Amino acid sequence: MTINIILLGPPGAGKGTQARTLVEERGLVQLSTGDMLREARSSGTEMGRRVSEVMDKGQLVTDDIVIGLIRERLETGGAAGFIFDGFPRTLPQADALTELLDGMGQSIDAVIEMQVDDAALVDRISGRYTCGNCGEVYHDTTRPTAAPGVCDHCGSTDLKRRADDNAESLKTRLLEYYKKTSPLIGYYYARKQLRPVDGMADMAEVGQQVAAIMDGLGR
Ligand code: AP5
């Protein structure tokens, strides 16, 4: 059985953290448009350069670019299910996703909305660092690496902070979220697909809430 879910929430809500657990424990494929765009920006192409500027300011990249990235990935098929992490982020992106999945005879099974207060988001974003090799996500206080400077997961010492994880860009990212992405909460509520979780709880507890939703979907 194929199961597709969306992780919806503001920057720093914990979408990537929970997506990694779902990949490991349930064999789903994570499709993070943020990760795809970061790959594009390091490609050195003109498109990568334009994407880079927009991301660093904390603004959203245009719908046609991100929809194109998702379309390309879905066309390769072959997954037991997808976790859409950071996509869709606008109503046109949501419509495009419905259409793309429809064309594959599939649909969205649940939209997990991660609810976190703005003040906590600032703390989470300003303390975040990730492994450049395997993508594991850490935090200075809530989830530091066991050995300083070494990834627990793969042993790499390539730990880095994101260029858009600064106070100025976070302000814009939050505004973009409330203006363009939060209308999706109503969109999916009306479709009876919305499943809110308390994202203020600690990581393990959020994981349990997400697991209960997944178990209810038979996955
Ligand atoms: P993207 O990479 O998607 O970033 P984001 O949505 O801003 O989300 P983040 O990755 O910042 O946070 P997260 O929710 O994954 O939190 P995490 O698990 O890391 O997008 C970046 C940019 O790309 C956008 O600004 C835009 O320009 C562009 N873009 C991407 N997709 C797009 C689209 N569809 N359309 C247009 N443009 C697009 O956790 C954060 C920290 O908190 C970590 O340190 C973690 O350890 C910690 N943490 C996690 N959970 C908890 C917990 N429960 N308690 C305490 N700490 C926790």
Image (spheres, grey):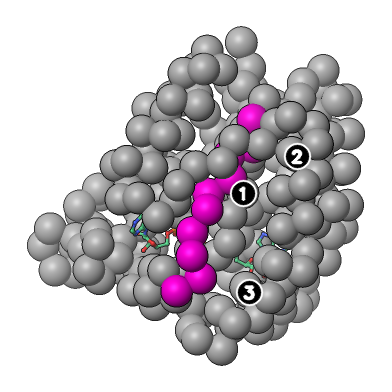
Say if disc 3 is inside 8 Å of ligand 1: yes
Q: Residue at x 59, y 82 (%)?
A: 171
Label 1 environment density (alpha carbons within 10 Å; few <14, some 14–19, many ≥20)? many
Q: Secondary structure at mark 3?
A: helix
Q: In the rendered structure, which amino acid carries the disc numbered 3?
A: Arg
Q: Tell whether position 112 is magenta.
A: yes
Quarter where residue 108 is shown: top right
x, y percent for residue 134 = 37, 52
Q: Is residue 37 left or right of residue 18?
A: right
Cα–Cα span, label 3 and label 2: 21 Å
* Residue, far bottom: 168
x, y percent for residue 191 = 79, 32
Please name whichever residue, 89 or 185, is drawn nearer the observer in this view of the structure: 185
Q: Earlier in the sequence, mark 3 or mark 2?
A: 3
Disc marking residue 73: none
Q: Main secondary structure of the magenta part?
A: strand
For the residues labelled 3 and 1, say whether their Cβ atoms are less than 8 Å apart: no
Q: Is residue 162 left or right of residue 150?
A: right
Q: In the rendered structure, which amino acid carries the disc numbered 1?
A: Leu
Mark 1 lies on residue: 8
Cα–Cα span, label 3 and label 1: 14 Å
Disc marking residue 173: 3
x, y percent for residue 57 = 65, 83
Q: Is residue 9 left or right of residue 62?
A: left
Label 2 environment density (alpha carbons within 10 Å; few <14, some 14–19, many ≥20)? some
Q: Secondary structure at mark 1?
A: strand
Q: Tell whether position 86 is magenta.
A: no
